Image (cartoon, rainbow, N blue to C red):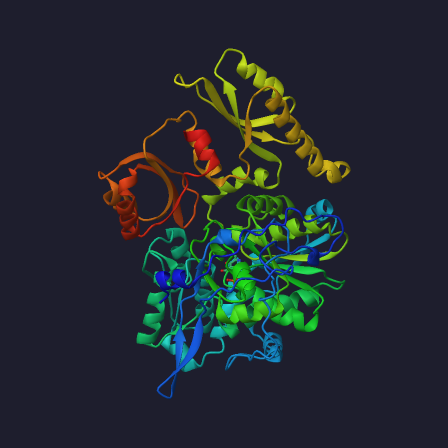
Amino acid sequence: MESQTIARRLLPPLPARATAAAAPRTAFSPQRFRPTSTGGGGARLPPLVASAVTTQREAGATYIVATPLARVSVDSLQYESGVLGAITERTRPAAGEERPNGALTPMEYLTNVLSSRVYDVAIESPLQLAPKLSERLGVNLWLKREDLQPVFSFKLRGAYNMMVKLSRKQLDKGVICSSAGNHAQGVALAAQKLHCDAVIVMPVTTPEIKWRSVERLGATVVLKGDSYDEAQTYAKQRAEQEGHTFIHPFDHPDVITGQGTIGMEIVRQLTGPLHAIFVPVGGGGLIAGIAAYVKRVCPEVKIIGVEPSDANAMALSLHHGQRIMLEHVGGFADGVAVKVVGEETFRLCRELVDGVVLVSRDSICASIKDMFEEKRSILEPAGALSLAGAEAYCKYYGLKGTNVVAITSGANMNFDRLRLVTELADVGRKREAVLATILPEERGSFKTFCKLVGSMNITEFKYRYDSRREDALVLYRQVRCSFDIRSRKTISSVGLHTDTELGAMVNRMKSAQLRTINLTNDDLAKDHLRYFMGGRSNVQDELLCRFIFPERPGALMKFLDAFSPRWNISLFHYRAQGETGANVLVGIQVPKEDMQEFKHRAQDLGYEYTYEMTDESYRLLMQ
Ligand SMILES: Cc1ncc(COP(=O)(O)O)c(C=O)c1O
């Protein structure tokens, strides 16, 4: 069991945020960028002490001691979208570092992929050109359509490849796994094919639509635990007690090999030279499998991982040269919301992967829209991740004329999430900006403001008179370009033109003494604060926190029992976004002297939370 206190004590302060903002963007050369202050560019990395396993000798015997993984924040490694990052001087294994006992050799991975039996259940998915995206980016962008698999994701490849190797006796004892998503369906389908029982343990918070679809495949669903970790602990215990085989979602050589068949197909399907394959990364099974095959047969092809910037466990592990545990993980792309990557997957990735591109939630939404416009298919967020990464990378390095492949890995979209996707897609493609402007509360100021906006289209506008104030706040969303962004003639100038246009408008506002703030990249403002327009007030001792509520009956009452009536709840906002945990913004009036008690109560409650009072948008919109 990992222990937070020990890990914290062991950890030195982590390196400052990496940024590539200063890197020039003319010619293509991924090696040009080095995250500042985090090593790789000459500066030495401070050691990250906690590690997974060490050996100790005592009284003549050798003990294996598992030390907790270092816990780090997603913010400790951020770099500009599109940059090929995460590889540092510590990433690659030291020369002569031995392969762990029992681990497959590179040749074994290769031959196992070649002889894999995934085609009993999986299709050889098509590799399709995306003509519109290719034209926009100036490259040949190929889509490896794993979203077209029988259970709408690649996960059945790995699950089946592991299960088909079990003996009849093992199969007769049944298999078990824990998953709230695509792995569950893969295991259930594989079990159906192999005529064995499958128990799928899912957190009690799993939406009915998901567990019902697994049940429909003939598996036994057990709802257990509030989180994925709790479900997994239970599944492993039950596997031991009842003799079931535990089917890991990513960290097993047979699972990795099964996913590796995708790499084999790409190499076979694409005849010309290939620059890079972009792979979404959760626990790392998919990228490890693809890299294990492709790097052996075409070492010049780059294998590039793509992670959401708030779920960057692989980037951080590669960066530190050891597996880390994320303190919090963003749940939007739930298929890749993993706090710790696998041991075997990490071993392969640190040797074979060329780097990781980080992308924002907004750009994932934009890629879901792109895919819809391209093929009329709807990808789930994790399924569109590689597209977002490929686009950001091609733009950042100015790639032209080459072949790149993005793995569209899944289409199990929670329908409720589409609302958020459609709202953010244009922001993600930088076609829309979210802005706030402070106007004097006097006659005619709104008209002045509209004149200053000029020809730019406004898609949403919010203003509310506040009698107590001398200034008024308007919040608006603005379409940044009124012409067709995809038109070939304007393609090269669009970014510059729209940025200039937006900048010019902000400057016009400024010279008219109207302060304008760009909130386009502020998730707090987009998710919550914009719904509170007109609600500004100076509430005493207000503590603003974002809590992740488990989505189950009683979660709100449990929360209220923890804090109310002890303190006053001054603000509460929740909007369903189809995520596994509900993202709730809460204001609570907690005097300074009660802070310790608040922290204890929050810890006992057990919901993840973060403070938001320092956010500029909070001060602007709410105070
Ligand atoms: C749709 C989708 N894409 C990508 C991934 C990431 O795969 P891995 O955990 O092997 O890195 C998953 C994992 O379940 C997934 O469901």
Left or right, 480 with respect to 611, comes to: right
- The reply to whether residue 247 is visible in this rendering is yes
Quarter holding the C terminus is: top left
Residue 128 image position (x, y, % from top left): 67, 56
Q: Is residue 436 above or below residue 567?
A: above
Residue 205 image position (x, y, % from top left): 35, 53
The foreground one among 38 and 506 is: 38
Tell which residue pokes out farthest to the left in this image: 565
Going 61% across and 60% down the picture, which residue do you hit?
A: 43
Going 37% across and 54% down the picture, which residue do you hit?
A: 206
Question: Within the image, what quadrant is residue 68 found in?
Answer: bottom left
Q: Is residue 437 above or below residue 219?
A: above
- The reply to whether residue 154 is visible in this rendering is no
Left or right, 565 with respect to 231, comes to: left
Q: Is residue 330 above or below residue 428?
A: below
Residue 469 image position (x, y, % from top left): 42, 19
